[in-house]
Amino acid sequence: MSEKREGFEAEALIHLDGLYGLALRFTGGDDAAAQDLVQDTMLKAYRAWDNFQSGTNCRAWLTTILRNTFINDLRRRQKRPVPVEFDEVAERPIYPQLRETDPEGRFFERIVDEEVIRAIEELPEDFRVPVVLADLEGLGYQEISEILEIPVGTVKSRLFRARRRLQQRLYSYAVEMGYIRGE
C-alpha cells in the first residue's frame, strides 16, 4: 500500500460520516446528492492529498473542499444566484423573550429537531451554510471563516442574521413546545 493511500485512509476517511451529515444539510436532505457530494469531495481530496500538510486540521480542509464542490455544482445548475437581502432581518430580536437567550446559538442547541432542521434548510445559502457549520457541526468562527473564505466578521454577521430569521420562523413553535413563554 502506498504512503499516500495510508496517510489518506488514516487522516481523511475517519471524517466520512461527518462529511455525509454536512452534505445532507447542504443538499436539503437529498440522500443521493449528499452521497455524490461526499464522493466528489473525497476524490478531490485524494487527488490533492500531496498538498495537505499532515498534522493540520484535516476536517476543516475536507469541509472546505466539500463546501467548494457544493457551491461550484450549485452555480453550474443555476444561471444566476438569488440575491439575499441582509437588511430584511431586524438588528434586535423581535420577541423580548429571546433578547437574552441567543447570543451564540444557545437557544437553538436546546430545540434542534425536525422542525428546526426544516427551518434551517429554508434559509438562503449565505445564511444556511454558516448556521450548519456553527450550530450543527460545532465549528468556531475562525474555522468557518477559513472554510467559507470570508472574514470572521462576515461569519458573525451572517450567523446573527440567520439566527434572527430562525427566531422569527420558529417563535410560535418554541412557544407551542414550551421552550419559551409566549407574550
Image (cartoon, rainbow, N blue to C red):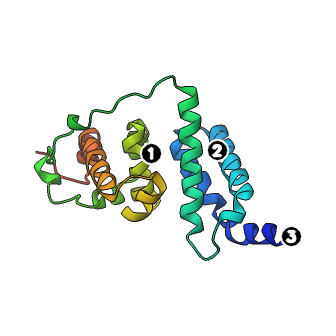
- Please tell me which residue is depicted at 39% across the width and 57% down the height of the picture: 135
Contact (Cβ within 8 Å) of mark 3 with mark 2: no
Front residue of 118/173: it is: 118
- Please tell me which residue is depicted at 44% across the width and 47% down the height of the picture: 129
Front residue of 84/137: it is: 84
- Tell us which disc is closer to us: 3 or 2: 3
Choose top left, top right, bottom left or bottom right for residue 171: top left
Percent position of residue 72, x then y = 57, 38
Q: Sequence-wise, which precedes: disc 3 or disc 2?
A: 3
Q: CA distance from mark 1 to mark 2?
A: 22 Å
- Circle 1: element type: helix
- Circle 2: element type: helix
- Please tell me which residue is depicted at 44% across the width and 55% down the height of the picture: 133
In the image as oriented, which residue stretches furthest toward the top?
79
Please tell me how crowded label 1 is: few (under 14), some (14-19), or many (20+) other residues with Cα within 10 Å: few
Picture quarter with the C terminus: top left
Q: Is residue 147 left or right of residue 30?
A: left
Q: Which mark is residue 176?
A: none
Choose top left, top right, bottom left or bottom right for residue 120: top left
Q: Is residue 14 left or right of residue 101?
A: right
- Please tell me which residue is depicted at 57% across the width and 47% down the height of the picture: 23
Choose top left, top right, bottom left or bottom right for residue 103: bottom left
Q: CA distance from mark 3 to mark 2?
A: 26 Å
To which residue does mark 3 refer? Answer: 2
Q: Which mark is residue 37?
A: 2
3 to 116, vertically: above or below: below
Q: CA distance from mark 1 to mark 3?
A: 43 Å
To which residue does mark 1 refer? Answer: 114
Give the amino acid type for the residue marked by disc 2 in the picture: Leu
Percent position of residue 178, x then y = 25, 52
